[in-house]
Image (tube, rainbow, N blue to C red):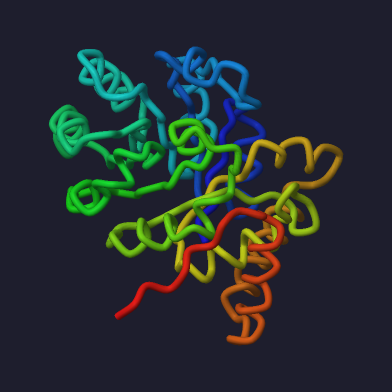
Amino acid sequence: MDLLLFTVDPRFAAGCVAAGAAGVVVDWERRGKARRQAGEDTQINGDTPADLAAVRAATPGRVVCRVNGAGSWTAAEVDLAVRLGADEVLLPMVRRPEEVDLALEAVRGRCGVGILVETQDAVDRVEELADRPLSRLYLGLNDLRIDRGSTDLFAPLVDGTADRVRAACSMPFGVAGLTLPEAGRPVPSRLLAGELARLGAGFTFLRRSFTADVAGREVAVEVPRILAACAAAARRSEAEVVADRAELVAAVGAPVALPQPA
């Protein structure tokens, strides 16, 4: 399981990568985000080009830059991210394949292009989106909940959405986020690790609470513990997978997708 960390602290980034995290995400997404997420318990970062340069200099790990959603500014943002050393750009709030094509044209093969599927439009067209040459595809729960007008953050894990999106992916797929195995609420991190394993996810983000959860602890100890929990989840028996899935469904408390007739 590749773990990606949102941070612009060069020392913290270097420590987490040295401990086993795959890389760091620097977050430039701000256009329309405050309006879209008004009144929601979400995080809007203020990362800068200087932050990207500093993180790039601090770590040999993969450096991903989340740019703004597709628009007339995309080419300039991509050029700047590439010049500053980004290995990959991450395109948020995708709705149409043409937006992905715009980012791919701007990149021109100079780095990877990943996308965030975090709108219902993107879920509905995920097979078209996933047909592009993408470096990764992540199902974003916060903005998808807002776009759907839902109150259930983790509902896509139990209503069939995550399974459908995963089935469309030939590139690395990710969803949700992890922190210390014994932490995480309202859904425990260990159950999310189990769901990532069940789905065959290749990566995830260290969730917003991770930085607080490791305060006063050694990341050289805690990051390997998270990776070990993911490895253990991948080794579960079929009965253990079924039991953990039932516990996850109960913790989420949202409607569960019913099997479809053949």
Measured as percent of width and height from the top left, residue 207 is found at 63, 42
Measured as percent of width and height from the top left, residue 208 is found at 65, 36
Rendered position, 104 above or below 106: below
Measured as percent of width and height from the top left, residue 228 is found at 67, 67
Residue 80 lies left or right of residue 50; in this view the side is: left
Measured as percent of width and height from the top left, residue 195 is found at 57, 64
Rendered position, 190 above or below 128: below
Judged from this view, the residue extending furthest toward the right is: 216
Camera-side residue of 79 and 200: 200
Residue at left offset 60%, top offset 29%: 10
Q: Quadrant of the C terminus?
A: bottom left
Residue at left offset 24%, top offset 15%: 76
Judged from this view, the residue extending furthest toward the front is: 261
Residue at left offset 43%, top offset 47%: 139
Rendered position, 32 above or below 141: above
Residue 254 lies left or right of residue 79; in this view the side is: right
